[in-house]
Image (spheres, rainbow, N blue to C red):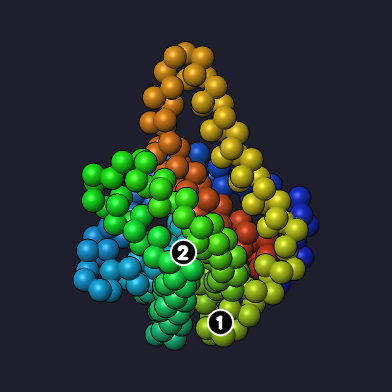
Amino acid sequence: MPLLLKPVPPNRGARWLTDGFRLYARRPLAFTLMFTAFLFAALVVSLVPLLGGVLQMMSLPLLSLGFMVAAQSALLDGPVSARQFIEPLRTDPARRRALLTLCALYGVLAIAILILCDAISDGALERVQRLMASGSATPEDVNAVLMEPGVTNAALAALVLGTLLSIPFWHAPALVHWGAQGVAQALFSSTLAVWRSKGAFFVYGMAWAATMVGFGMAAALVFGLLGLAPLGTMLALPAGLLFWTVFYVSLLFTFNDSFGDAGRRGANA
């Protein structure tokens, strides 16, 4: 089925968020276990000498596409499982090569950004990682490194370059999987789609920011009034797991609004 790039009004950005939460609520355990399985696999991959970091970054396009496949399946009342991370690699050789090329390209560019940002920070980011990995670092030690002048510039560079990198790769894996596009065409189509829907993506980002800040403030207020502030801090990990899982679930809706219904297309792919 051919893809058709459609205009997306800005107010759809907030709808992507609510649609993500609504679909997650239909399969909360399955989606959460799926994301947890990916985190565990990423942890194991990180142990690979020299290539662990690159392999982790290379897996991110498959993470987003796997969740889109799972969300499509949930919309059709089908199963949701970690096996859907590798389902796109079981298609024809041309699409498999294109997906693997996207993964490799994303991994190399992401690592290049991290190396550049570490250089801008004069090695501060690497020192923070070593401190946290040591398990013996105090908050004062970490804060001392984070207060170094280059850290702010490195964080800003990471934000800008990371955003620029995400634009061509946002829809690209799905365009290869459901649209059978080549690597260059998928990257171009994704960039064009995000640019044409920039208002919706801005609202989407603001809605996510408001949701997370609002949750943090509400949790701090409630647990503070109850005298249970440490318990509120403990909610950060499960809340982060929830929000990241819903974020990946919501990616399908950004694609559907930009290119058409992946659910119907998936049945004919």
Q: Position of residue 153 (x, y in %)?
A: 55, 62
Vertical arrangement, residue 162 with respect to residue 210, above or below: below
Q: For residue 121, which numbered disc appears in the image?
A: 2
Vertical arrangement, residue 149 with respect to residue 52, above or below: above
Marks 1 and 2: which is nearer the front? 2
Q: What residue is shown at x 54% (from left), y 45% (from top)?
A: 23
Q: Position of residue 234 (x, y in %)?
A: 38, 31
The part of the image, by quadrant, that contains residue 101 is bottom left
Q: From the image, tell me which residue sits under label 1.
A: 181
Front in this rendered view, residue 118 or 208 = 118
- Dot 2 lies on which element? loop
Which amino acid, by three-letter code, is at mark 1?
A: Gln
Q: Position of residue 59 (x, y in %)?
A: 38, 68
- Dot 1 lies on which element? loop
Can residue 113 be seen at all in this image of the molecule?
Answer: yes
Left or right: 205 as drawn, with respect to 74: right
Front in this rendered view, residue 8 or 3 = 8
Q: Position of residue 40 (x, y in %)?
A: 28, 54
The part of the image, by quadrant, that contains residue 27 is top left
Left or right: 11 as drawn, with respect to 220: right
